[in-house]
Image (cartoon, grey):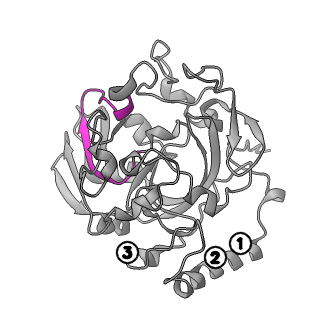
Amino acid sequence: MLIRHRAGWELPESAATPESVYLDRRQWLAGAAGLVAGTALPGLARADTTAPTSDLYPAKRNEAFTLDRPLTEEKLAASYNNFYEFGMSKDVAGAAKRLVARPWTIKIDGLVEKPFEIDADELIRKMGVEERLYRFRCVEAWSMAVPWTGFPLRKLVELARPQSGAKYIQMQTFLDPRMAPGQGQRWLPWPYTEGLTLAEATHDLTLMVTGIYGKPVPNQHGAPLRLIVPWKYGFKSVKSINRISFVAEQPKTFWEGLQASEYGFWANVNPEVAHPRWSQASEQVLGSRERRPTLLFNGYAEQVAGLYKGLEKERLWA
């Protein structure tokens, strides 16, 4: 007899959304995108119908990636963001309207077979997209549950054809203080830079995000392309990526450059390892009074713990 063990992100079938409700939601979203193209509800991001890839949304959901909690309301997720390029507050949606996300070119370089540049929408269409439901955990001890749309980063790695010496991926966002006033703060180590090992980057959970809530990703979430690594703290999720480099040495990230005593390269979620200034044992659920116990690797330990065998001496949790 075949006994199947559910992955940590999977729900029992009895708890799944009925198909009729799921399909009705999809049809409503598709119709609403056209009906409200000129307006937006307070707190909600208007779908970017001018994006050349707007026809890809809403994308088909990959049912292998589900949740143990309700989705965060779209208006809450749209109005509670960190995007320091546009200000230090959480409500950066208005300021982020300054971001010009089209046209957008992404440079792929470093230890690859042949460096190249590619238009973001050309890349998105070439990769194809799907929707996945992921937990999101901030190092500030708040959390949400998000329907991201995108493609696995491993597909881009395959496209880039890294050389044997490539051990890490370094990702950077744009650098334009005229467009992003936060970059005028010269004490911050701009441009925003993040990094993963090649093994982390090619794990199936690691997602290059192009959309959210059935629409192209809005500016405050990092249009047109951002990273989501769901077992890591959210500061690893670099936004508005315009350069991806394959490198041999571990890259120095933005937060390491700013405050290395508090933020390191790995940033894996662990409730037993406190931030120097606050506990990580629990998390505040965005839009709720509920406080949940924090899960090891944000609940994805079964899938990703093996990536860190032999690295026990590394500072994996900050």
Q: Which residue is mark 3?
A: 51
Does residue 178 appear in the picture of this structure? yes
Q: Amino acid at mark 3?
A: Ala
Discs 2, 3 touching: Cβ within 8 Å: no
Q: Are marks 2 and 1 in contact (CB under 8 Å)?
A: yes
- CA distance for labels 2 and 1: 6 Å
- Disc 3 to disc 1, how far (Cα)? 25 Å
**Residue 249 covered by magenta stretch:** yes
What are the residue bounds of the magenta stretch? 238-255
Comparing labels 3 and 1, the label whose residue is closer to the camera: 3
**Residue 297 in picture, x, y percent from top left:** 60, 32
Q: Quadrant of residue 103?
A: bottom left
Which residue bears the numbered disc 1?
22
Q: Is residue 270 magenta?
A: no
Please give the name of the residue rendered at 36% of the width and 48% of the height, measured from the top-left corner: 85
Name the mark nearer the viewer: 2 or 3: 3
Q: Amino acid at mark 1?
A: Tyr
Rendered location of residue 205, percent (x, y): 52, 46
Residue assigned mark 2: 26
